[in-house]
Amino acid sequence: MTGIFPWLILFLPLLAAAGITLFALDHRAVSARLSIGAVVISFALSVALFVHGTRGETRFNWISLSDGAASWIVDIGLRLDPLSLMMLLVVTGVGSAIHIYSYGYMHDDPGVGRYFAGLSLFTFSMLGIVLATNFLMLFIFWELVGVSSWLLIGFWFERPAAADAAKKAFLTNRVGDFGFLLGIILVWAVLGTMDFGQLQKMMAANPALIGNSTIGIAGFLIFCGAAGKSAQFPLHVWLPDAMEGPTPVSALIHAATMVAAGVYMLCRVHFMLAADALEFIAWIGGITALLAALMAIQQNDIKRILAYSTLSQLGYMVMTVGLSGVGGNPSAAMFHLTTHAFFKALLFLGAGSVILALHHEQDIWKMGGLSKKMPVTFWTFMIATLALCGVPPFSGFFSKDEILATAQRTSPALFALGVAVAGLTTFYMFRLIFVAFTGPVKSQLPDHAHESPAVITLPLVALAVPSLLAGFWGIDRFYASQFGTGEAEAATGWVAQLTAPFAHAPGAAFGGLAAVVIGFLAAFALYWNKVQDPLPAMLGVVARWLRDRFYFDELYAKLIAATQDALATLADFVDRWLIAGLFVKGTHGSVELTGRLLRLVQTGNLQTYSLMFVAGVAVLLLFMLIR
Amino acid sequence: MGLLSFLILCPFAGAVLIALTPRSFNVLFRLIALLTTFLSFAAATWVFFAFHPGATHVQFEEFCPWVGALRIGWHLGVDGLNVALVFMAALVAFAAACCSWEIKERQKEFYLLLLVMTGGILGAFASLDLFFFYFFHELALVPTFIMIGVWGRGENRNYATFKMTIYLSLGALIALIGLIALYVAAGARTFDIPELTRDVAARPIAASAQHWIFPLLMFGFGILVSLWPFHTWAPLGYGAAPTPTAMLHAGVLKKFGLYGLLRIALPLLPEGAQRWLPVLALLCLGNLLYCGLVAIRQKNLNLLIGNSSVAHMGFVFLGIASLSLVGVTGAVVVMVAHGLLAALAFALSGYLQNQLGTLEMEQMGGLLRKLPFVGTLLALAMFAGCGLPGFANFAGEVMVLFGAWGGHTTVVVLAAWAALIVGAVYMLRAIRTVLHGPLPEKWSGVADAPHAWRKLPFALLLAGLLLFGCVPRLLTDRIQPAALTVVRAVNGTPAALMATTQLPR
Amino acid sequence: MQTVFFYVFAALTVLCALMVVANPFSRNPVTSAMFLVLTIVSLAGLFVQLHAFFLAAVQVLVYAGAVMVLFLFVIMLLDLKEEERRKVRKFAVIAGGLAVAIIAVLFCTAIGQTTAGIGVQPILEGGTAALGELLFKHYLLPFEILSVLLLVAMVGVILLSKKDLK
Amino acid sequence: MNVGLEHYLVVSALLFALGLLGVIVRRNLLVIYMSLELMLNAANLALVAFSRFNHNLDGQVMVFFIITVAAAEVAVGLALIVALYRKRETAHVEDLTTMKF
């Protein structure tokens, strides 16, 4: 691989972030132009690389320690292969749309400079993950993504909710990173290298390695990291709260960066995940998908519904990675990740457009009738919804179908789960459409709503195109070339492409479609033209459990209070009362007590002193005489 | 006069100049302090970048015999272990001199003591003679106590001063006993450290003697570095110290104990090290985990920073205890990184204290709105403190964790927990309460750092952190040969990169 | 004859000293001072017994003369009445007496235990000339320093006696 | 019966003990001071006796010095007592306990 292009792609956003921070924090136009310019140029360069078909690696040495026999080497490098090339396009492409959209969305905020700096940093970090050549470099950018998300989620830091959400996101991610880092250390300790290329070669040369129990444990630990970033089941709690950030940030986090990182990383290191770890991963993904879909059906905040939808779709992807088997082909997950990036970004941006029009009202039960007022937003939103639900010929249909087909091949239980989630997805998405866009107006707010300006609608339209068409572009085959299986030969002609899923795995395709239809009908029956949610009355306590997210947050709060906080209190107690108290003050006290006792002797009376003096002399004399 | 002599004597010359300046020239004191520390800093920068990485021998060496009979000499020089420390010390000293604008009374004495402290610190790190090594450290400690006692803040500064004085004197005393015992046991009759090292390598000290001398040095130096459970002086002392003193002590002078372990205890007492370092590896958990947990509960920003500073020392201890090339190199990197970070954090908290008059976190909130510059830097410092990549701390900490994995797996697991999660919890809690949230009415008059001079020290320290964080090779390439020598001295050749069994490739 | 004189002077010295310290009849410092004069004079007698004639003379001149006059002068100056009959601290007196007795016994035991050395026979004739020779030759420097000491003491006393002592 | 060194030394010891007793039990500063003189004189006696029995004049020289120093000491001491009396209106040791902590 030659040239400076890949480095430019990576570092332009960083330069933009640094430039804004140093010079243009107070100039909104300059900062926006810098940030947008950087990501758009990166996108253009990525397209150029993609078209050119560049492959290979470039690197420079970051740290190198060697004692002659063994060495510890960390490189900062760029790795261009189908996986990273496609992700580059997704990150910079979707990122560009979001950047441009942000210019409109954040126009009136005083902190625009800070916002765009954060956005650029976020893009930079994500690109670093995508291009990483080794585990530690991946981890470095992994952490940077964490801090960028903290910056952006907590952008409105004066709101306690936003500040708390930022903190929660970072800390939850850190729990995952803890496992990730240990996994990386373990990989290095066992295999002596952290470089993906070398590891892959090593694995290919010695297939028995994958059965090694230490490597199996390392796989689990590495998945912890992915679970944190991709918000999988035990660590999913941060994602819905992250909605406190500005809406374009949510779009970025949910579509192109951050949550995608986990799935991407799993695919990147897929070659060294053992069978046990994969099965575990599959089930975690499935559980996340189902739980999140269930929680989504009782949310009323437009962004939260989308957040749970993201969770659920991520569960799908992770499940697919798990189901693809040892040394298998997880390209379905990447395919879904890509299409999901398009339509989820579109959904969030559309939601942002609605929120902007309604002066930051996010409760869907205060909306209604927006399809007439905001046609562009509505129709693009609709396209994204259909894609998300998996309606042919939208992009989501193809990617979801591949997932279901994989599940059908390997695990009937997870296949059933996947189909159920597909139905639930359609249900909650159309609930959102019916309540917010088509149904009767439920407050005064929508009366004054009007379509957003072009700077906002253009990105919507731009994203609607791939949401609609990405299924036909052979993205899955491109990814598959990474994993060397190359099973899916290209169908010719668009009709053949459209019907390809039905030809390959008819069970999965029809099952998915049936779920979509059922979900749609249920939503139609329950929510068409409704002003109030009928479900709580029907489900009672279950609805409350769904609405309150199965009380995970409360559980974790209790858990943390019972463990870490209790430990901290204990440590503080020990520090204050035992070490600083008993030992230090005790020593101090006993010395002082001795001093006080000896002070009694100091009467100030001359004669007492001389008496003691005499007594001392007597003792000395006696001693000398006896001796 | 060599460059090292110059950078050590510069602050002392400044101190003499200040002593000779009449009391009414307040501006002049500041000017002299800034100028001399800047000259030291410039010289140290030159030394650092002209230092030839990869070479094992001592560079910029200067030698001048002093007491012939005892073989004490003015022997200066830098190798991988101390070249970065000298650079960091000079940088922090310059920043501390810049931050001294908050001192308004008895300026003459303050700047004088500051310069003496600076000279002592630089001397302690650049000396290769046992006598001067110890002498300069003590010389730097005395002004520390006076500065805390006279210019300290907070109502219990007397208690803090006494506690710190007693602890540090005790630590220095124990270390001195250890050094004397070492000198006697080695039977080499020289104070020259390289010569002593060569002698001991040729004729090792008896194992039985090593086994009791090493703990003396370990705990003596350990108390100076706030090794758990001898750490309680540190948060309290730093909370009470005036900002420049806290910066210099927490940032630089404290590292003397660690440097002593690496420079003297490990190479001269390999058998003792083998026996006692596992104990150190366990005690470092006390620093990392326990002090981290304590930091979670702190309500005062300075106490929080102080506790976190104590916690970070655990990484250095763990790196030293790992006895692996990666670990020891990482330990030195953490020393440098933490020096810059602690100085930055205390400088910022000093600024806040100056503006708000309090450091109780409950009373703060939303300060980022009022203090975009200082607030951003504080947030960055906090993130550096919880090991964010891009800052030098990350490079060091991750190396320590890697290096120690083979020998102390369980410790590494807990240390990683402490680093990634406990550290993040208290740092983010601090940011959340101090910088985020609504701004209380009473802080509407708070002002950000007004001009470049005020911003300079913060920016310099942060730049150092970022430079070493983004290009850690600047440090590791210089440290590696010296670290390898130390590890080989203890383990015998070949030095294990990491003591673990690797699978067949 | 020698022996008799020794015992007479020795008894006189010890008895008068006892009267200085613990006079059962009077607590008046003047009485004590007078007995001190007697003690010193009888000591001078003992000095004569030891053939230290010059010292005996100096003893009488300086001690019995100058020093005791100073004492009496101060007693008069301060107009000290008889020591008030404060409550006698029995414990202190007993403890003091006991300690002193122990010391005395110990001294005597020590003297008794000492083996006789060269100093069995009184042999030295304390000639004033010889003393003067020694003093002005061998001990010249200490002698001169002593004069400086006296000067310093003089200045000190003048300073201390000034009315407005700060 | 010959008078030997030890006879003089016993007298000296008794004299010293009596002086010590005075210092410890008497409460008038002046009397204490006199007792001190007694102790000095006891030492003088011992020195003179040693000088005679050891055939060495140095003891006598020492006594000469002691007498001189004692004279100076008495002068200074008495001046101190006078000054003290002026300030505190007492020459009683029990009233002088300002050195107590």
Image (cartoon, rainbow, N blue to C red):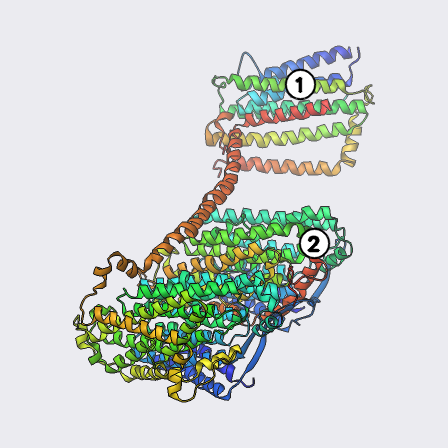
10 Å crowding of disc 1: few (<14), some (14-19), many (20+): many
Quadrant hosting residue C104: top right
User: Is residue A341 depicted above or below C149 in this figure?
Assistant: below
Q: Secondary structure at mark 2?
A: helix
10 Å crowding of disc 2: few (<14), some (14-19), many (20+): many
Q: Nearer the viewer, residue B498 or A312?
A: A312
Instruction: Look at mark 1 in the image and give the residue it sits on.
Output: C104
Q: Chain of mark 1?
A: C
Question: Do tags 1 and 2 sit on the same chain?
Answer: no
Residue B133 in picture, x, y percent from top left: 65, 57
Residue A596 visible in rendering? yes
Residue B323 in picture, x, y percent from top left: 64, 58
* Disc assigned to residue B270: 2
Mark 1 residue type: Ala
Mark 2 residue type: Pro
Give the mark toward the camera: 1 or 2: 2
| Labels 1 and 2 touching (C-beta < 8 A) | no
